[in-house]
Amino acid sequence: MSNEKGPAKFLLYALTMLFLFLTLLPIIFSFTGLGIRIQLFFFVLLLFVSFIGLTTYTTGGERLLYIAFTLHLINLLAIWFLTQKLYLLAVFLALFGFVLSFPRKPDVYEEEMPLSSEIEVAKESQPKVHSQVIHSPGKFAASKYGTVYHAPKCDWAQKIKKKSLMWFSSADEAKKAGYKEHHCIA
Ligand SMILES: [Zn+2]
C-alpha cells in the first residue's frame, strides 16, 4: 500500500464506496419492520459520512472513510450474527476499503525523527555549536585567532567564542594548521 493520496486512490475509494452501497441496497430491503428502519438510518448516515470523507479527501477525509468502512464492516458482521446470512461481496468491499484507508503513521513523523546517521552528519556539518565542546571527545579545538589547540574538555577550549571556534579531527591536522599543543593535551 502506498502512502500517496493520488487521484487513482481517490477513484478506488469512490468506486469501492459506490459498489458497497449498491450491494447493500438489496440487503437492506430484505429486512422488514424495525430492521429495515435501522438499516436505512445506518445507510443514510454512512452515505453522509462517506460523502464528507470523499469531498474532504485531500485534507484528512481519509479518516472519515476509514470510519465509514469500519462501521460498514461492523454492520455486516451484526447482520451476519443476527440473520446467519453472510453477504460476502459486501463484506469483501468493506474489508477492502477498511484496509485501504487504514491509518498509517504520517510522513511528518519520519522527518522529525531522522536516522542516527543523519544526526551524525548534521553534527559534523555544524561543529561550531558550543555544546559540541563537551560532546566531541577525541577532537581538538582551537581559536581562529589563537596559537594553541586544546582538548575539548579544557577550560580554555570552552572559553573560545562560537564564531572563532575551529575543530581538528587529529593532532596532526592541528599542527599542520600551525597550532601547538596546549598543556591540557599531554
Ligand atoms: Zn587547553
Image: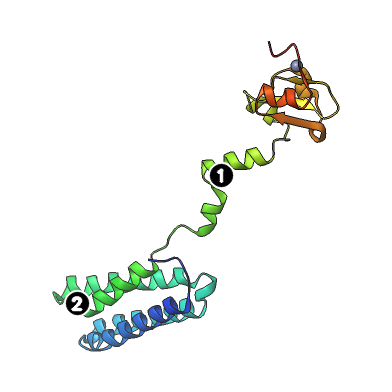
Q: Quadrant of the C terminus?
A: top right
- Please name the amino acid that badge 2 sits on: Leu
Q: Are marks 1 and 2 in contact (CB under 8 Å)?
A: no
Residue 10 image position (x, y, % from top left): 44, 78
Q: Secondary structure at mark 1?
A: helix
Vertical relation: 137 (above or below) 118: above
Among the 4 quarters of the image, the one containing residue 92: bottom left
Ligand 1: image quarter? top right
Say the numbered circle drawn on residue 118: 1
Q: Quick one: label 2, few (<14), some, or many (20+) residues within 10 Å?
A: few
Residue 29 image position (x, y, % from top left): 24, 89
- Please name the amino acid that badge 1 sits on: Glu
Asked if residue 70 shows in the view, the reply is: no
Which residue is more in the foreground, 13 or 138?
138
Q: Quick one: label 1, few (<14), some, or many (20+) residues within 10 Å?
A: few
Q: Earlier in the sequence, mark 1 or mark 2?
A: 2
